[in-house]
């Protein structure tokens, strides 16, 4: 076993400090829904569509009479999960916890704000 001596401690990032510029620190639900991107819609649609056959095959595995019911139930659960995922991703981008280049341009944040936010993040 080889031990490598490392004198430099690892730099830890506080998860409560956003990595990207904050567009809205506490966005309303209307602002979050207005900010949902096409990628969020695609992820939501993917979750909804893939949950249908998954539920069908799982239901058919246990009891063939339950296949359709489990398909519909898993479709509903997958759709709700997809909607919640889109909402969460949109809110996190507005709060600066996700890559938000489009939001920064849309809301017109100044370059001084972005530079000062980058300076505040360094330890």
Image: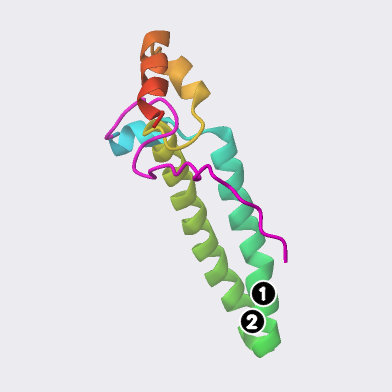
Distance, label 1 to label 2, CA atoms, is: 5 Å
Query: Is 15 covered by the magenta stretch?
Result: yes
For residue 73, which numbered disc appears in the image? none
Magenta region: which residues?
Answer: 1-26
Identify the residue under disc 1. 56
Dividing the picture into quarters, in which one does residue 119 lie? top left
Query: Is 3 covered by the magenta stretch?
Result: yes
Q: Position of residue 99 (x, y in %)?
A: 51, 32
Does residue 123 appear in the picture of this structure? yes
Q: Main secondary structure of the magenta part?
A: loop
Residue depicted at x 36% and y 16%: 116
Q: Residues within 10 Å of mark 1 (few under 14, many from 20)?
A: many
Count of marks, rendered view? 2
Dividing the picture into quarters, in which one does residue 117 lie? top left
Instruction: Judge by depth and name the residue closer to the eye, 119 or 6.
Output: 6
Q: Position of residue 49 (x, y in %)?
A: 64, 57
Identify the residue under disc 2. 59
- Placement of 71 over or under 16, stated as above or below: below
């Amino acid at each position: 076993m080889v031990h490598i001596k490392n004198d430099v401690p690892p730099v830890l990032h506080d998860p409560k400090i956003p990595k990207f510029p904050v567009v809205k620190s506490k966005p309303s639900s209307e602002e979050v829904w207005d900010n949902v991107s096409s990628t969020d819609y695609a992820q939501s649609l993917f979750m909804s569509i893939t949950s249908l056959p998954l539920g069908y095959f799982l239901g058919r595995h246990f009891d063939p009479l339950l296949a359709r019911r489990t398909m519909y139930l898993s479709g509903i659960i997958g759709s709700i999960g997809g909607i919640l995922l889109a909402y969460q991703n949109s809110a996190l981008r507005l709060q600066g916890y996700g890559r938000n280049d489009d939001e920064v341009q849309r809301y017109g944040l100044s370059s001084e704000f972005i530079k000062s936010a980058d300076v505040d993040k360094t330890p």
